[in-house]
Image (cartoon, grey):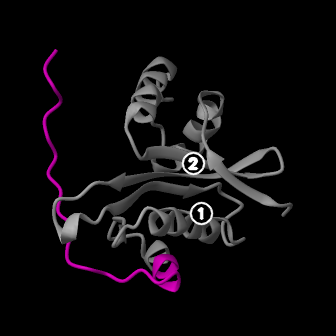
Amino acid sequence: MTALRIRLAERSDLPAVLRLLRAFDPPGAPEPDREEAERVFARIESYPDFAVYIAEDGDQAVGTFSLLVMDNLAHGFTPAGLVESVVVAEGRRGQGIGSAMMRFAMDRCAEAGCYKLALSSNVRREDAHRFYERLGFVQHGLSFSVALPAPRA
């Protein structure tokens, strides 16, 4: 591995980011709609303290994640961080890329004065859980979600 670089993703990085995020798709899922992806990416860029990052090894995109630093009315108005959509390219896992991305996110949150950095992980992803635990994350509480109906046009 050459020098790994983690930086803000730009619109020109969107094809690489989408390619990496396909790891979350079930087999046979359709390709993401490029126009919709560009619209969502532009919206993410408009949020304060919300960004998509890309990890590069040379000129190759090898990982991505999103990081949100949220203002907070609780905890003495101390912000909290939320990392989402963490993925390392297949064939590049186990090389320290994921660790570098998570340390990058932890550093950003520390710089922002966050009292915590949180993430959620599917209960079946036991390898990912061990990875996060090795980085110092601890299981805290339970995560709940509810599927919502698609908005009506």
* Residue at 31%, 62% in the rendered image: 79
Rendered location of residue 20, percent (x, y) = 59, 46
Can the viewer see residue 26 in this picture?
A: no
In the rendered image, the quadrant that contains the C terminus is: top left
User: Residue at label 2?
Assistant: 53
Image mark for residue 52: none
Q: Residue at x 55, y 37 (%)?
A: 18
Q: Secondary structure at mark 2?
A: strand
- 141 to the left or right of 133: left
- Is residue 16 placed above or below 94 in the rendered structure? above
Residue 109 image point, x, y percent: 45, 64
CB atoms at circles 1 and 2 under 8 Å apart? yes
92 to the left or right of 74? right
| Count of marks placed on residues | 2
The residue at the point 52 percent across, 81 percent down is 135
Q: Mark 1 falls on what kind of element?
A: helix
Residue 50 lies in quadrant: top left
Circle 1 packing at 10 Å, graded few (<14), some (14-19), many (20+), is many
Residue at 62% x, 31% y: name it.
Answer: 15
Amino acid tagged 1: Met
Q: Nearer the viewer, residue 73 or 96?
A: 73
Q: Return the x and y of residue 16 as percentages of the image width and height.
A: 64, 38
- Inspect the magenta stretch and tell me whether residue 141 lies in it: yes
Provide the residue designation for mark 1: 101
Examine the residues drawn in magenta and state their main secondary structure: loop
Give neighbour class at mark 2: few <14, some 14-19, many 20+ (Cα, 10 Å). Answer: many
> Where does the magenta region start and end?
130-153
15 vs 72, nearest the viewer: 72
User: In the rendered image, is residue 55 in sight?
Assistant: yes
Quarter assignment of residue 102:
bottom right
